[in-house]
Each structure stands twice: as structure tokens, then as C-alpha cells.
Image (spheres, rainbow, N blue to C red):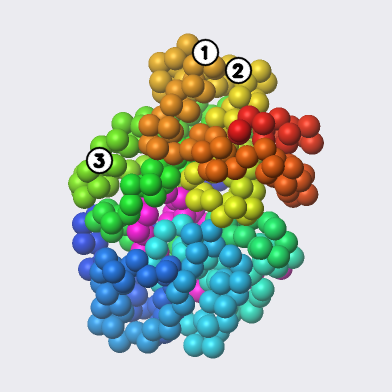
């Protein structure tokens, strides 16, 4: 087991109507809030009104920044940070899924100094201060509500990258499973793929950590068990609560303690490449990329893949394990090939070129130039 430090300062409030307790924690944070959200679904389902009421009841002045995309872009982070500076924002309330909360976390470290968000993402500037972020989660998927990471893309440089630091942990996160009732079936499924992919990234990181393995295996088994139920019964509180907490635990650190890094992350970088090029939903890129990556790595880490299959699916070898993962993703109506995403042979070259340009690889299982062609072939 590798040396590790346990640190997670986010206070999570989980449960039905939990937002009603927000007033108690926002009053000490200041008098001016920057409210960040997406393209308007939170207004149609009543979540926006519920959050604004909590702020209004405390006499908080609200500045708003909306329109965050599903694959968030750096320009929105820049504009949101500027709005925060203009309004002398004391804290941020992020209402949405991973894209909104990721953007808010990055904005939170770029207001006081001020800093350019992309310079921060590229580690050209190191933030020393932040303002608090309150996350109100509306999608079970990324785990961003209890970790210090953000992923954004820059269309100009054709990069989609992640960045994290302790200043970017949300101070408070409100998780009400009722807020995910209106999430469509396809987005619910993509969220389940995402949480499983996060768990697998940790599972294939460097370092032996048997208890973390068991945490990871349990999270995957929980997701597989509850997935068909939550998709068939989208307004079942019990099912929604189980998948929401599984997604949080998949990337709050519990699956990576004792490993050298939080994960390998090579598959996510492959998925980010596809999102950058074609604006595919994040989960859809992962349901395509993960089986292909496992096939690429099968001979190198056969024992590890087999162990996963034995403990999660009851399979006896690596090939069966990969097949079970692929079948599960397909059972959720998630794509398992790029052809299902309407790509064809003519797209191969530009995918390979961007993988090469951005030097896509993993922290543990390194990818070489020749691997780019192989992985693209396997994704088709």
C-alpha cells in the first residue's frame, strides 16, 4: 500500500428536502452570491425557485450566470469569473450537474486575485485564495460535489483537461435525490457509466490497496444492481438516492486510498478527446472507450481484469469480464462503438491525430503512439 493522506473538507447534506436547511449555512458566508446554472432545466423543474427562495430569505443579493454547456467550456468560466468580480461576490451557488459545479469550482479560485481560468487549468498560475462554493446537485454522475477537481474544454486549443487543488473542494454540497427525478433516461444511464468509469480508473491505478479494491467493487455492484430499476422508475426516491450516493462515493477518494494516484485516467482522456471533437455526452464516450481500453490492455493486466470480473460478475477470465462490462453498458442503451455514435472510417485519422497532439496517456498504464491507432480501431 502506498503512502496517502485523507482530506475531504466538503460538508455533504443528503436527503429529501435538504435544501430547506441552506439558510443556516449561507448567512455567515456574506451578502452577495453568484448563482451559476445550465441552460434552464432547473427553472422548469422548480429547483431554481427553491434555491433562490433560500437566498432571498437571507437577504442575499444574487448575480446570475447561466448557459453552462454539458461539455463545459473555458470561455464560460472566464465570463462567470468576471461577473463575480464585478459584483464583488462573496460565495458561489452552483445548481446543476458536473459541468456546472466544475465551472463554479474553477471560478471560485479566479475571482479574488484575479486569474485567468485556463492559466489555472494549465498550471501556469497557482491560486492562493478562493471564495466558497455551495453545490446543489441535480445529476448523479461525476462525483464533483465531494472532490476538488474540474474538467473543462478549450475549443481554441482543442483540449479537454482536468485540474484540481484543495481550494476547489465545495464547502457545502446539497444532495436531494428528488432533484434528479426529471433527468432523462439517457442522461441517467450516462451518469451510471460515468460513476463506474471513475471507479475503474481507481481500480487500475498503481498500487495494491485491497480495501480500496473492495470499496470499488461494491460501488460497481451497487450501480449494476440499481441501474435497471432507476431507469425504469425515475421518480422512485429509494433508487435515485442509491445511485446518487454511489456516484458521490465513486470519486470522493474512498476508492483510491493506498494507491499512488487517484486513478489511471487514460480512458477519461480518450473520452475527452471524443467530446472535444464531436461534443458527445461524456458518459457516451466512456461506454465506448472503456471496453476498447480493456481489450487493448488485456494481455498486460489480465490478472487484474480477471480479479475485477470474479468479484463483480462472477466470471473466470479477463475476456469474460470485458464482455460483461460491454453487455451492461449496452443494456443501458449506451453506445459501445463509435459506429453507434454515427462515426465512420473517415473519422479515424482526426481522432488519432488529436490523441497524438495532446499526448493522451494514463498515469499508470502509459499509451504509446502505436496504441492510438489500436484503441481507435477497437472503438469502431
Within-10-Å neighbours for mark 1: few <14, some 14–19, many 20+: some
As displayed, is residue 125 above or below residue 53?
above
Tag 3 near tag 1, CB within 8 Å: no
Q: Point out the residue furthest to the top here.
A: 316
Between discs 3 and 2, the one toward the N terminus = 3
Q: Position of residue 25 (x, y in %)?
A: 32, 71
Give the image quarter of residue 23.
bottom left
Which residue is labeled 3 in the image? 232
Quarter of the figure with the N terminus: top right
Look at the magenta stretch and give its main secondary structure: loop
Residue beneath the point at 42% across and 69% down? 39
Residue beneath the point at 34% across and 84% down? 60
Tag 2 near tag 1, CB within 8 Å: yes
Q: Which region of the structure is painted magenta?
A: 125-148
Which residue is labeled 2 in the image? 302
Separation of marks 3 and 1 at Cα, in angstroms: 31 Å
**For residue 126, side relative to residue 217 (left or right):** right
Asked if the magenta segment contains residue 230, the reply would be no
Amino acid at each position: 500500500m502506498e503512502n496517502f493522506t485523507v482530506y475531504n473538507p466538503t460538508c455533504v447534506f443528503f436527503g429529501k428536502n435538504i435544501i430547506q436547511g441552506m439558510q443556516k449555512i449561507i448567512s455567515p458566508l456574506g451578502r452577495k452570491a453568484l448563482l451559476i446554472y445550465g441552460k434552464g432545466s432547473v427553472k422548469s423543474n422548480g429547483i431554481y425557485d427553491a434555491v433562490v427562495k433560500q437566498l432571498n430569505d437571507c437577504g442575499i443579493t444574487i448575480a446570475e450566470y447561466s448557459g453552462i454547456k454539458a461539455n463545459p467550456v473555458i470561455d464560460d468560466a472566464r465570463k462567470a469569473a468576471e461577473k463575480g468580480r464585478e459584483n464583488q461576490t462573496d460565495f458561489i451557488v452552483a445548481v446543476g450537474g458536473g459541468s456546472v459545479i466544475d465551472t463554479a469550482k474553477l471560478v471560485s479560485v479566479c475571482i479574488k486575485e484575479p486569474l485567468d481560468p485556463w492559466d489555472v487549468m494549465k498550471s501556469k498560475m497557482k491560486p492562493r485564495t478562493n471564495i466558497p462554493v455551495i453545490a446543489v446537485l441535480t445529476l448523479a454522475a461525476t462525483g464533483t460535489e465531494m472532490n476538488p477537481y474540474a474538467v473543462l474544454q478549450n475549443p481554441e486549443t482543442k483540449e479537454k483537461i482536468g485540474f484540481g487543488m484543495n481550494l476547489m473542494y465545495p464547502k457545502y454540497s446539497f444532495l436531494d435525490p428528488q432533484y434528479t427525478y426529471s433527468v432523462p433516461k439517457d442522461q441517467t444511464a450516462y451518469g451510471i457509466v460515468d460513476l463506474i468509469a471513475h471507479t475503474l480508473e481507481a481500480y487500475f491505478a498503481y498500487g495494491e490497496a485491497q480495501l480500496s479494491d473492495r470499496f470499488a467493487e461494491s460501488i460497481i455492484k451497487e450501480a449494476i444492481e440499481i441501474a435497471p430499476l432507476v431507469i425504469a422508475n425515475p421518480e422512485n426516491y429509494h433508487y435515485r438516492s442509491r445511485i446518487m450516493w454511489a456516484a458521490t462515493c465513486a470519486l470522493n477518494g474512498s476508492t483510491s486510498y493506498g494507491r499512488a494516484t487517484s486513478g489511471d485516467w487514460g480512458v477519461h482522456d480518450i473520452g475527452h478527446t471524443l467530446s472535444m471533437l464531436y461534443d458527445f455526452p461524456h458518459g457516451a464516450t466512456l461506454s465506448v472507450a472503456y471496453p476498447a481500453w480493456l481489450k487493448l490492455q488485456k494481455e498486460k493486466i489480465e490478472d487484474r481484469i480477471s480479479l475485477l470480473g470474479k468479484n463483480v460478475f462472477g466470471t473466470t477470465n479477463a475476456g469474460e469480464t470485458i464482455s460483461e462490462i460491454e453487455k451492461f453498458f449496452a443494456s443501458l442503451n449506451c453506445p459501445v462503438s463509435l459506429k453507434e455514435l454515427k462515426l465512420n472510417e473517415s473519422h479515424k485519422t482526426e481522432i488519432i491525430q488529436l490523441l497524438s497532439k495532446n499526448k493522451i496517456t494514463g498515469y499508470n498504464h502509459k499509451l504509446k503512439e502505436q496504441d492510438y491507432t489500436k484503441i481507435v480501431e477497437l472503438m469502431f
